[in-house]
Image (spheres, rainbow, N blue to C red):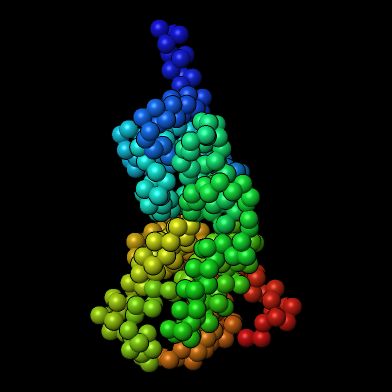
Amino acid sequence: MLEADHARELRLDSVTGMLSSRALRGRLAEECERSRRYQRGLCVAVLGVDDFEALELEHGFKAGDEIVVAVARHLRASTRSHDVVGRTGNAEFTVLLPDTDASSALPGLERLLVELERAGEAAIGASMGIAALERAMSAEGLLASARHALAQSRATGGGRATVADGNDAICEPAKPPQREAIDALAVALLERDRYTGEHSQAVIDMSAAVARTLGCSSVEVERVRSAALLHDIGKVAIPDEILNKAGPLNDEEWMLMREHPVIGERILSVLPGLGAVARMVRHEHERWDGRGYPDGLSGTQIPFGSRVIIAADTYHAITSDRPYRAAKSHEHAVEELVRCAGTQFDPDVTAALIGHLYGRRQSGLMTV
């Protein structure tokens, strides 16, 4: 009985209950042989959680295990009964897809990446490499090809799936695909409403500075920057007569305006790699005390980036001319931030933002 239990432990990963790396490689060899014997397709996908080491370093090993378990749960729910799934690395999973070619596998695997980014309280960013068995390829070669495609996905910005093309060179593009999408959306926002576009640009520097001050990694700072740039993207769906109304909105207009964070999330969440950014955009009007919208989140339930953006957004809105009122002073805006710290705003974020603004005024970079 003890020997059977030990054998089972060797076959199964202790954290996820999935096949271990050793057992998965054994199944891969069997599937390759079966594919050749019956002349059927075989596809391998390797999924890796992006920035996993940084996540573990920041949040601890327990949080790392929770992420791994969440990925395993989604893989089980998203794969077919005859697919084979195993954990083949610290934050790496491998899926064997019998009777499947790469082009057929790609759409479903891309949907899985988007679902992971929308999952749970913390979005999980992941990349994937996909390879199909070729005539002279060994089991080890097939797995290596999929892992190489995973490296290509990460080299082009992460958060996406790449199909192996037989080329071993990994090229770094001038711009990752997500960056191109973000830039295109920012241009659309600026063309739709110049104030909104310029306002978003102004909020970026404050948001990024606060994120750096509070110890965020470079990856997280870039996500906050992207969300700050696009936090009002949902306003492209708001009619001009509401967006530019020179006076208070009525109840019906206000209900429509309150939809813009949800619309923004819908626009961004369909793009692989922007799940975390989409969540920040959805929740950028939540309040620290739970009285915000659209979901009434409170405290640290609100994504960190959203907490940063709402404070920076409020400061810039107060100090800018709007159709319904003139700009107010820097001093007035800071007083409002201090007054609402602990109710509307995260107190730590508020303190970091005021410190950043004070530093800019001291250095002569701010004239308001």
In the picture as drawn, the residue positioned furthest to the right comes out as 363
Q: Is residue 160 above or below residue 69?
A: below
In this view, the residue in front, 15 or 128, is 128
Q: Where on the picture, by quarter, is residue 173?
A: bottom right
Q: Is residue 190 above or below residue 149?
A: below
Q: Where on the picture, by quarter, is residue 59?
A: top right
The residue at 38%/33% (across/down) is 39
Residue 239: percent from left, percent from top: 32, 84
On the rendered image, what quadrant is the N terminus found in? top left
Q: Position of 226 compared to 254: left or right?
A: right
Residue 200: percent from left, percent from top: 51, 76
> What is the count of numbered marks?
0
In this view, the residue in front, 169 or 48, is 169
Q: Position of 152 compared to 45: left or right?
A: right
In the rendered image, is residue 301 in sight? yes
Q: Is residue 260 above or below residue 198?
A: above
The residue at 36%/48% (across/down) is 104
On the rendered image, what quadrant is the C terminus found in? bottom right
The residue at 41%/91% (across/down) is 324
Residue 355: percent from left, percent from top: 65, 69
In the rendered image, is residue 248 in sight? no
The residue at 56%/46% (across/down) is 166
